[in-house]
Amino acid sequence: MTAVTIPGVDQAPTTHHRLLAWVREVAELTSPDQVVWVDGSEDEWTRLTDKLVDAGTFTRLDKKPNSFYAASDPNDVARVEERTFICSVDEADAGPTNNWMEPAEMKAIMTELYRGCMRGRTMYVIPFCMGPLDAEKPMLGVEITDSEYVVVSMKIMTRMGTKALDRFVDADGTERDFVPALHSIGAPLAEGQADVAWPCNDTKYIVHFPEERLIWSFGSGYGGNALLGKKCYSLRIASVIGRDEGWLAEHMLILKLTSPEDKVYYVAAAFPSACGKTNLAMLEPTIPGWKVETIGDDIAWMRFGEDGRLYAVNPENGFFGVAPGTDYHTNPNAMRTIAKGNSLFTNVALTDDGDIWWEGMGEAPAHLTGWKGGDWTPDSTEKAAHPNSRYCTPIDQCDTKAPEWDDPQGVPISAIFFGGRRATTIPLVTESRDWQHGTFMGATLSSETTAAAVGAVGVVRRDPMAMLPFIGYNAGDYFNHWIETGKRADATKLPKIFYVNWFRRGDDKRFLWPGFGENSRILKWAIERIEGKASARETPIGWVPTADELDLDGVDGDRADIDAALEFSAEEWRAELPLIEEWFDKIGDKLPTPLRDELEALRQRLG
Ligand code: SAT
Ligand code: MN
């Protein structure tokens, strides 16, 4: 039998045997017209963005240098959680919170979907590295995709191309492991068939094989479904690697906080998608003398350092931020970052003079092209930008990036914040009693759903550690991993855990806390707690400050509202207990006993 010749498949700029074999195997299965090994160069970026403009996928923005607007298919706008699977060998390892299918059965289905799926298209091979390239053990991956949009997005979001491929084979010839991530939009083109601007497939699968550290994605070209270095690798697969190797892969921003005394602290914070991680990571403090710098806005990998402290690295290279609501008031640093150009904007609105616009960005122009492509005017009843529309922009051009954002050692974390979007019950800030209690807070985190995933918006669901859609294994085992992590270090070296809720509302539904830059007041209080300088009152749910204990000098908020945001209500918490109970029952027999104990202790304290 002679091997099929596909142009480019043998022009591999590597000798890595497993990579070469996998690329050939995928090319033979998917039948692309040609194979292109992605180098990550500026020439390549220009070639691909030109091609995307010609195809009608991209519109070049006149008002932002080297930047492009794209509108996706209206059925391909967010992560599809019901089509996302953890195909562990044993169903129990996927646990009660993930979809599961037998790996062989899933592979049989997807192999048939992949067969010939790249006909008429180019297959791109993207070598990438999550986290710093000079890490002792670089976290390598290769995404194969038939989407140029994915290639250029991956250039922003990861360290990719030749500089990543250089790390695949060591000087002594040792071939490193990598995570293979196969992606296809699932839209082959017949001879002479015209393409559409956003090809995709109604059948979608986002699949992880945790034992094999393997990712297969089909049918979607958007965000976390398609940029496989992000949620698929850096959270779902990395959480499994972290479980096996003793570290944590978390859905957290990382920020650097400098006090007026020039003391530096690093904070990690987990909020569900579209709950303000990017805004907090780029926050401009409203309290004088404090400074925030950005290390990451979405993902943190945390490992113990030799000194016993927990060090965090941001595996990403860019921001994939929610656009609506972002403006010079809510997140000036994001606005300055995208103003520099070199960015992609998906499902926002397009202005007549070649710029972008979205809800929350000042007054709407008289006429726009809405994200669905039609005319939009301020009288339109539909939104101009999709609520999950995104900007994609390099960290490197963010003025507030901390110089150490690319340090392979990571940064030592002093505080972990868990937070959700809750109209009631959860006070503005609560400090946990200890690591185990903090783990309980994280494990019972709840939030109203947002547009970041397909489905109803505004429904309260448990979102443990903001990782519900991203835990790559059994949630009970994941909680246990958190508890065990706390036992591996001296309690004085562990980060202190806090639970925050910027989104509590008054009776008339207005937000009680001004949020955004004012959140620096909560950061300051947390740091002062760590330093033993601030007081708080002990409540059955943990340590909650009164308004007097916060620095509220010049705050843009009403004192009565702030008191209400800080209120601990035993009545509301008693109503919360059965919901936590129900959640723990759903986790089942893998729920760690210490978390049941925490629930019982809370019940006792609530009386
Ligand atoms: O689409 S993504 O998964 O990358 C964004 C998010 O939901 O956080
Ligand atoms: Mn996210």
Image: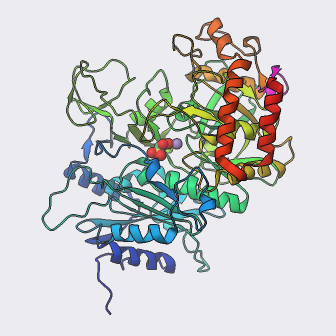
Looking at the rendered structure, the number of numbered marks drawn on it comes to 0
Estimate the x, y position of residue 315 in percent, counting from the top left: 57, 52
Instruction: Please tell me whether residue 558 is drawn above or below residue 361 in the rendered image.
Output: above
Q: Is residue 170 left or right of residue 524?
A: left
Residue ID at (65%, 40%): 583
Estimate the x, y position of residue 400 in percent, counting from the top left: 56, 34
Estimate the x, y position of residue 557 in percent, counting from the top left: 59, 10
Magenta part of the chain:
528-540
Residue ID at (64%, 23%): 520
Instruction: Please tell me whether residue 183 is drawn above or below residue 307 in the rendered image.
Output: below
Instruction: Please tell me whether residue 426 is drawn above or below residue 33 in the rendered image.
Output: above
| Front residue of 139 and 27 | 27
Q: Is residue 376 left or right of residue 498?
A: left
Q: Residue furthest bottom?
A: 1
* The C terminus, quarter of image: top right
Residue 538 within the segment the image draws in magenta: yes
Estimate the x, y position of residue 525 in percent, counting from the top left: 74, 23
Q: Residue furthest left?
A: 192
Residue 244 within the segment the image draws in magenta: no
* The N terminus, quarter of image: bottom left
| Front residue of 69 and 105 | 105
Q: Quadrant of residue 124?
A: bottom left
Instruction: Please tell me whether residue 70 is drawn above or below residue 365 in the rendered image.
Output: below
Is residue 302 visible in the rendered image? The answer is: no
| Front residue of 545 and 80 | 80
Q: Quadrant of residue 428?
A: top right
Colour approach in the figure: rainbow
| Front residue of 387 and 516 | 387
Residue ID at (73%, 58%): 246
Is residue 79 visible in the rendered image? The answer is: yes
